[in-house]
Image (cartoon, grey):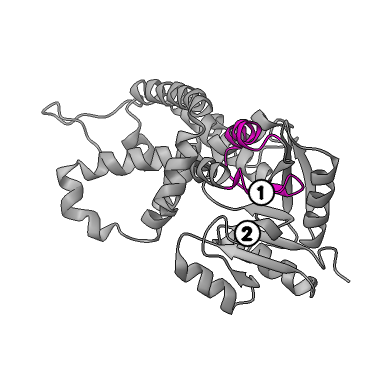
């Protein structure tokens, strides 16, 4: 018997996360009933045909009276409307689990609109193509109690995952950095390039894998992009200030052609990323240089010593008899 057998769950939002949670739970719980709703009707139909839900809901309030657990897998900006819509219809015993990006907003709205219901936040750190075997951040709200915590523990267990307790601000700061900031930066760079007359002539030739990787943060649903930014603006402002500070620092290095400093940034960030993707604290000293230090002229290693002299204005450049610089 599955841990969710004889329970009724309603999932609002049948995108990748909501769809896969419903499908995974139904595979393990034969007596579970999963109601599903999405504003896009085709997603509801696909979910029903794929056994990701048991019943199709016609609206947020459809079947809500029978729901013991509600899972919100929608853009954060949609949650206020949902909570406001179900506030007078939901049973006080119904537990609400949200999988939205911005948790501080959810916490405030939940306390205001559903003060008598237990609400708890979770966030999946997906590392592959499966909803199974991932880490799940668990975020407690003012209305979170023992019962909702136990059900989230069971949910993460059913999804073969590991639970990680996160602070509200800690979670939202992480989301601002990893989800919203890439979208803001990419949007700015794309806007700059689109305003360039030369880019308009050659863009079709650069529409390759590199461009797709560079622009991938903007491949999300525009509603999710707006929602992630608009519900986390204070933390985003802090990250933007830090980012601008880093850009100004790099700008000064470029203006002074400070090869050593630029090489140091390249080396450090390359190593830090390598440590992070291998679950190593980037603040720890590896004990050895993964790539040569800037004192070994990293630019020469990347593009060759002659080319390095070409690009480095700090080097002495020979001139011909007319006084023009010899660039090769």
Q: CA distance from mark 2 to mark 1?
A: 14 Å
Mark 2, Cα crowd under 10 Å, few <14 / some 14-19 / many 20+, is: many
Quadrant showing the C terminus: top left
In the rendered view, does 18 fall on the left or right side of 309? right
* Residue beneath the point at 47% across and 30% down: 262
Relative to 59, is 258 above or below?
above
Is residue 160 shown above or below 257?
below
Residue tagged 1: 90
Please give the name of the residue rendered at 74% of the width and 42% of the height, measured from the top-left corner. Answer: 138
Q: Position of residue 157 (x, y in %)?
A: 82, 57
Toward which corner of the image does residue 101 lie, by quadrant? Answer: top right
- SS state under label 2: strand
Left-right relation of 62 to 200? right
Name the image quarter holding the N terminus.
bottom right
Which region of the structure is painted magenta? 86-115
Report if residue 120 lies within the magenta region: no
Q: Position of residue 163 (x, y in %)?
A: 79, 47
* Depth order, front residue of 208/195: 195
Question: Would you name the residue on which mark 2 appears?
Answer: 11
Of all residues shown, which one is farthest toward the bottom? 49
């Amino acid at each position: 018997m599955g841990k969710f057998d004889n329970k009724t769950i309603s999932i609002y939002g049948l995108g990748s996360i909501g769809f896969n949670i419903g499908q995974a739970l139904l595979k393990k719980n034969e007596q579970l009933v999963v109601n599903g709703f999405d504003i896009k009707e085709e997603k509801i139909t696909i979910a029903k045909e794929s056994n990701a839900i048991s019943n199709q809901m016609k609206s947020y309030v459809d079947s809500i009276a029978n729901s013991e657990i509600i899972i919100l897998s929608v853009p954060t900006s949609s949650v206020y409307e949902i909570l406001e819509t179900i506030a007078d219809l939901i049973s006080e015993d119904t537990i609400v689990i949200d999988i939205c990006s911005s948790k501080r907003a959810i916490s405030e709205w939940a306390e205001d609109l559903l003060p008598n219901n237990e609400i708890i936040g979770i966030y999946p750190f997906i590392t592959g193509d499966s909803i199974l075997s991932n880490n799940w951040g668990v975020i407690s709200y003012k209305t979170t109690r023992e019962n909702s915590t136990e059900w989230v523990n069971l949910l993460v267990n059913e999804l073969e995952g590991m639970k990680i307790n996160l602070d509200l601000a800690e979670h939202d700061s992480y989301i601002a950095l990893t989800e919203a900031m890439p979208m803001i930066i990419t949007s700015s760079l794309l806007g700059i390039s689109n305003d360039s007359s030369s880019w308009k002539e050659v863009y079709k030739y650069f529409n390759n894998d590199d461009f797709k990787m560079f622009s991938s943060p903007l491949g999300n649903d525009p509603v999710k992009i707006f929602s992630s930014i608009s519900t986390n603006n204070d933390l985003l402002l802090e990250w933007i200030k830090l980012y601008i500070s880093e850009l100004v620092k790099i700008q000064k290095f470029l203006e002074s052609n400070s090869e050593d400093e630029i090489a140091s940034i390249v080396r450090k960030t390359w190593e830090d990323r390598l440590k992070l993707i291998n679950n190593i604290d980037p603040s720890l000293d590896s004990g050895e240089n993964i790539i040569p230090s800037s004192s070994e002229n990293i630019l020469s290693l990347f593009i060759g010593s002659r080319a390095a002299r070409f690009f480095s204005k700090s080097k002495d450049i020979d001139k011909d008899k007319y006084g023009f610089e010899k660039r090769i």
